[in-house]
Image: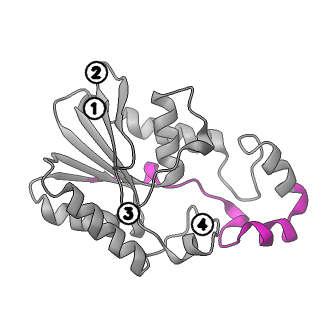
Amino acid sequence: MTLFVTRHGETTLNQHRKFYGSMDVALDDKGQQQAAELAKKLRRQKLDVIIRSATTRTKQTAQPIIDDHPNATVYVNADLNEKGFGDWEGLDADEIEAQDPVTWARWIEKPFDVTPKGAESYKVFSERVLHAVAGYQDLLASAANVLVVAHLGTLRVMHQSWVPDTVFWDLNFKAGHYSTYQSDGQGKMKVIAFNQ
């Protein structure tokens, strides 16, 4: 099996560097352009299955690809949604620090251990993403070509589960690009190419 993964296109909240994990926002003009560029890159690639999260931004990113691959089976899985950031959503780093300086300082020091008010813990987030991936284990062990359209945090969790020595924050899945993994048929994934 060959797995292709991609991040959704840009939104206005990306532009303004806001935290917005669980907020359901649409792509901006640049994001729509990135989605079109991505679809063009994948147009001649055989895709048997397309899996996306349950957000508007991944739906809009995936749609041009789905249009080009009408025979692909499409799955929508909310467990692939981005991590929820609770009270911090819709705010940038300066706004968060001004409103919640103590939690912000603790989170900067230990981002995997500190959970903002109303947010999803990193442990719960990573477990739901990996549970979603495990649900496709038979598919990942098959000969199918699969595309996942998701979010930066989601893709980082997936990649790190396959390449454990990777630094979470160093992984930059670029909008408008896709990365390729190859399955060994036993549940292990090998990185073939990054941000094509």
Q: Earlier in the sequence, mark 4 or mark 1?
A: 4
The magenta-colored residue range is 75-102
The span from disc 3 to disc 4 (Cα, nearest Å) is 14 Å
Q: Is residue 74 above or below residue 20?
A: above
N-terminal label among 2 and 1: 1
Left or right of residue 101: residue 115? left
Comparing labels 2 and 3, the label whose residue is closer to the camera:
2
Q: Residue at x 60, y 40 (%)?
A: 168
Mark 4 and mark 2 lie on one chain; the one further toward the N terminus is: 4
Residue marked by disc 3: 58
* Place of residue 188 in the rendered image (x, y in percent of width and height, measured from the top left): 37, 23
Residue drawn 17% across the image and 51% down it: 73
Q: How far apart are marks 2 and 1 (CA)?
A: 9 Å
Q: Which is more N-terminal, label 3 or label 1?
A: 3
Circle 1 is placed at which residue position?
140
Q: Is mark 3 on a helix, strand or loop?
A: helix
The three-letter amino acid code for the residue at tag 4 is Tyr
Q: Which dot, 4 or 2, sits closer to the camera?
A: 2
Q: State if disc 2 and disc 4 touch (CB < 8 Å).
A: no
Q: Does the magenta stretch include residue 27?
A: no
Identify which amino acid the numbered label 1 is placed on.
Answer: Leu
Q: Residue lying farthest bottom?
A: 29
Q: What element carries label 1?
A: helix
Q: Label 4: which residue?
A: 20
Q: Classify mark 2: helix, strand or loop.
A: loop
Q: Where is residue 32 in the image (x, y as percent from the top left)?
A: 35, 75
The amino acid sitting under disc 2 is Asp
On screen, residue 44 above or below 96: above
Which residue was labeled with disc 2? 184
User: Of the residues shown, which amino acid type is indicated by label 3?
Assistant: Thr
